[in-house]
Image (cartoon, grey):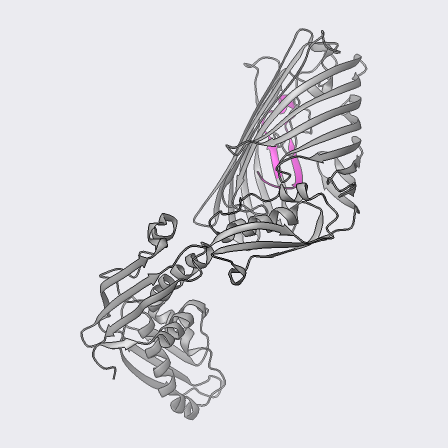
Amino acid sequence: MLSKNHVVNSGRTRLLALLFLVCPLVSFAQQVEVQVEGDYPNLQDNAEAFIGEIEGRSAFSLRRYAPTAVGQAEKALRALGYYSPVISWRVEEGDEDDLSSLKLLITPGEPVRVTSRTVEIRGAAASDPQFSDDLPAHPAEGDILNHGEYSALRDNIQTRARRRGYFDGRFVARTLEVDPEARTAVVRLIYESGDRYHLGKVYFDEGHYFEIGLLRDFVTFEPGTPYHADKIARLNRDLSNSGYFSGVDIDARPSNAVDGVIPVQVAVNRRDPRSISAGIGFSTDVGPRLRGTWREHWINPMGHKRGAETELSAPRQNLTTWYELPLDPPMTDLIRLTAGYQREDIENVESERFTLGQQWQHQLDIGWLQVLSIRLENETFNIGNDEKGTSSLLLPGASYSRLSVDSALDPFKGYHLQFDVVGSHRAVLSDVDILHVNALAKGLFTLFGKHRFLGRVQFGGVATNHFEDVPPSLRFFAGGDQSVRGYGYETLSPENDNGVPVGGRYLLVGSGEYQYQFADKWRVALFVDHGNAINDLFDPLATGAGIGLRWISPVGSLRLDVAKGLNTELGGEWRIHFSMGPEL
């Protein structure tokens, strides 16, 4: 029996909490069966987890094991605050085909409750709201004692201290006093933080090849900044994601501190300068396609890059080359010079386009990514042999986008917003006046872990004084995997007298999708798409609906859809759509 005013030592408390937190909750088809009187599923699960799997024992062996099983069950209940259970047992002998079984019947009794909770932060951390605020609320006064919650509260304080640089912190009081007879527990945690450490100057080891100014642009904190582990983690992540290095090692140990200031030593290993990759893909929009990429990850100590990308499919072939100059900060800001060629032959619309341009990418303080661009574009097009032309355009433009997701591969919630505008004027190296606008919004949220809802809205418009001179690349087409399913790729648009889609002045598309996860990495989907490319905002829109299957592969979501276009007069029919890539 435990004595009154028993003080649970830290070792026992840690053991009980650890066992409770990490032991799996298993389903038992074995020789020990636990039954808890009343509605206590957590107690039964924890008792089964403590006892573990027992198989292949005789009735005699189970009788010898019974006291051990009872002791394990008592520990399991004590970890959840039930110190006075009544446990009886019996062995049921099996026949020739069935094994014998040990049955434990548990009456939990009255639980121990927390009657006092004292959690006090002293020292510099007491005036640090991000340290002292929002500490775990449990165990609270009146709660049934849970040793796991007590351990989590204690560990949370220690973890915060390490993350926020209170490396001299210690508990001056750390007790959990339990009186099993009175069924009371007193929690007392007093933490003396000491002073907070600060980050010092960042030093880069020699032999890295790059200009020191470029590397220092990756550092987002000044010397003297209060220590936070996230600042070191971000520096490591940004250097690793730069594409310059195969390895990054950052030494910011508090043992190296001088007067509370930690010097930051960074060692980097330069990666191979070049890489080549190729891949094969497929979608019902363009069929099989081959992609190839050549990259030169660094070409000089200033960190300049260059590369080329190509995509080859039956309806589209393109080649793009680029040269990139990092700016400050190099994680987000850059200047990119581009040149490209693209040929398309889709639904009787042929085009051949050459482009030469420049982009300036900048991350705004409000979180949006801004891309300002200017490109010179020459396009020769033939639409159904009825409309032929050549356009030369100088197109300045601006793009603003924001992506927020909780996971890059398979997000549970998030959104993607994008707004693009480009224009041309006959007075400046252009054949036609154009103002082209495109806006896109996507959203995703998940309920109860298995129910996902996706929405998509897209609007586009082109203003011009002579639409016939607008090249196909700046007109709007709808239909296909990423637009309105149940219709052919880019078949939804106004048609000429011969029934050939020629592209519209406006684009209106909306989509709603529900997904249910029925197995790990697998979901079934129901969706409705509604939209069209039109010349008048009051023109009819097309609707498609269907069912789909989703597999979350190691490289992203693979989507197989069966859709029915509901507007047969607009080309709606049963169609299979296959695509892959991010949902946002």
Q: Is residue 69 left or right of residue 316?
A: left
- Is 508 rendered above or below residue 153? above
Q: Residue at x 74, y 29 (%)?
A: 337
Q: Is residue 181 left or right of residue 392?
A: left
Q: Is residue 394 visible?
A: yes
Residue sticking out furthest to the front: 259
Q: Is residue 284 magenta?
A: no
Residue 81's spot in the image, x, y percent? 28, 70
Q: Which residues are magenta?
A: 562-584
Residue 372's spot in the image, x, y percent? 64, 25
- Is 98 rendered above or below residue 404? below
Q: Is residue 583 magenta?
A: yes
Residue sticking out furthest to the left: 182
- Is 148 rendered above or below residue 210? below
Residue 417 location, quadrant: top right
Residue 43 location, quadrant: bottom left
Figure quadrant of the N terminus: bottom left
- Is 526 rendered above or below residue 197? above
How many marks are shown on the rendered structure?
0
Residue 463's spot in the image, x, y percent? 62, 12
In depth, the one of 303 and 444 nearer the eye is 303
Residue 481 location, quadrant: top right
Residue 510's spot in the image, x, y percent? 54, 28
Q: Residue at x 76, y 33 (%)?
A: 323
In depth, the one of 496 and 447 nearer the eye is 447
